[in-house]
Every structure is written in structure tokens, then in C-alpha cells.
Amino acid sequence: MPLFVLATPIGTLGDLSVRARELLASADLIAAEDTRVTRKLLSALKIPAPRIVSYRGHEEAQRAEGLMGELTGGAKVVLVSDAGTPAISDPGVHLVRLCHAQGVPVLSAPGPSAMATALSVSGIQAIPATFLGFSPRKPGPLRRWLRDAQALPGAFVYFEAPSRTVESVAAIAELMPDREVCLCRELSKLHEEVRLAPAPALAAALRARETPILGEVALVVGPGEPPKAEALSVGEDSSLSEIAAALAQRWGVSRNEAYSALLKLERQQNADQ
């Protein structure tokens, strides 16, 4: 039997597909990030719980061998995380790779993804974009991590703890004041909040906020301006409009944004002469 990698709701139960419900209802075994969370989901769906095993952290390697035995023995195994799509920032990669290595088919039951949802509602150009998972907890490592992310082409997305969100956005504003940032909080839930602003403006708004930031937070950081070296690499014989078009595609920004950046560069060059 194949392994089914199944996405669960990130907030609203109704987002679970009909096919996902059918797979959960017909599963012989569910490999879950947290068995308690999965049991609550099945209860809400009024689906009788099959066997459920915990699959996370230090248990992954050991559990994967047992799950492979179930799969090769003909059991219908479904892999889930607490919310969203497994094997991205949640457990599952080890089992999926083991299936590929041993010739066991891996099939998808796609659905909710906090990363994709955050990108889609942010209004930020998403191609290219890099997903960085969860940010470091301490301020020093966070700043070093953001400096590394600053060099990435295009946008980047990461998950942040609500208690560290103000500090995290402030660090972005300091290191990347030219970037846009979209705060995505409690996506698809009752108190959903999506807020797009230049990094310094968003940092100031969050510092002035009277209510605490609660719930699940994803931050989408927009691309920076194409640097001088990139502009020069396109070609000296190209027009400014042609260079802007090439850089817009390469860096995942709009043509107007690239053109504006090139005009600034041209003005700086003229001022230096």
C-alpha cells in the first residue's frame, strides 16, 4: 500500500477536503505529530479513530521502521501533522524518504498550508520565494539568521512565535528598511489578521499596539531592490526598460519596482560623477 501524506486544516475545519475525510475514515493507521490533536480532529469529523501512533522528534527514525512494516504488510497508512501539510516544517521527511528508498509509493492528499496561504494573501511577489521554517528564539541568532535571509533572491517566509513577533519585525526594519513585510496571524481562524506595510511602518504599528499578539504567526518579507552588480550583469547595451524587465524576472519583483530601483541607481551614478 502507498503512504498517504495528508494536509489537515490550519484553522477552519471546513477547509478539509472530501477526499481527505475519506482517507482518514478508511485508514488502518494514522501516523500523527500529536495523537491528542489528531483524535480531536477525528472526533470533530465524527470519524471513528483507527490506530494512531505518535510520529515526531526523536521517535521518527524508530517509528519509521515500524510504519514501513505496516505499509509493506498491506496497511493503509496516513501521515498527518497537527495543522497544515506534513513533512515541510513538521515531521515526516524521514518516513517519506524511507518509502522512496524502499519502493513504497508516496501519494498526496493536498490541502491547507500556512506557508502558501501566507504568500497568497500577502500581496508580495511570490516567485521566487524561500520558506525558512521557524525563526531562532534568541535575539543574537535571530539577527544573524535574518542577515543570511537578506541575501536570498526574492521574498522569504517564516513562522514566528507571537511573543517574539514585535522584536522580529523590528529587526527586519533595522536590517532591511526597504522591504515590505506582511504579518499573517491566525490564518483562516476567527481572529485572522493580514497586515502589509513597509517594515519600519509595521514595526512602529506593532510597538504601539495595545493588545498582545496571540496565535499562530507567519511573516512574509518582500524582496529588496536589485543591487548594482545585478543591474550591470544584464548588459551594457540594453535599455533601462529591458534591464528592468530582466531584473524583475530574476528577483521576483514587479517591473515598476525594478525600474524605480534602476532610476535611483542612475541618479546616484550621476551624482558621483
Image: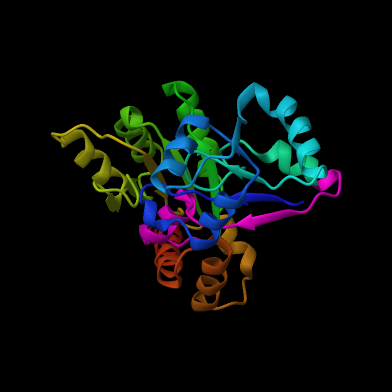
Q: Is 73 placed above or below 53 here?
A: below
Q: Is 93 placed above or below 249 here?
A: above
Could you say where residue 172 lies in the image, as x and y percent from the top left?
A: 38, 39
Q: Nearer the viewer, residue 223 or 14?
A: 14
* Corner quadrant of residue 55: top right
Could you say where residue 204 lies in the image, as x and y percent from the top left?
A: 21, 39
The stretch drawn in magenta includes residue 166? no
Q: Residue at x 71, y 28 (%)?
A: 63
Q: Residue at x 66, y 51 (%)?
A: 4
Could you say where residue 122 lies in the image, as x and y percent from the top left?
A: 37, 57
In this view, which residue lies farthest toward the left? Answer: 210
Q: What range is drawn magenta here?
A: 100-126
Q: In which quadrant will I find the C terminus?
A: bottom left
Q: Is 230 placed above or below 235 here?
A: above
Q: Nearer the viewer, residue 123 or 141?
A: 123
The stretch drawn in magenta includes residue 111? yes
User: For this view, does 202 lie left or right of residue 231?
Assistant: left
User: For this view, does 37 lie left or right of residue 94?
Assistant: left
User: For this view, does 71 lie left or right of residue 259?
Assistant: right
Say if residue 60 shows up in the picture: yes
In this view, which residue lies farthest toward the front? Answer: 48
Could you say where residue 236 lies in the image, as x and y percent from the top left?
A: 62, 71
Say if residue 227 shows up in the picture: no
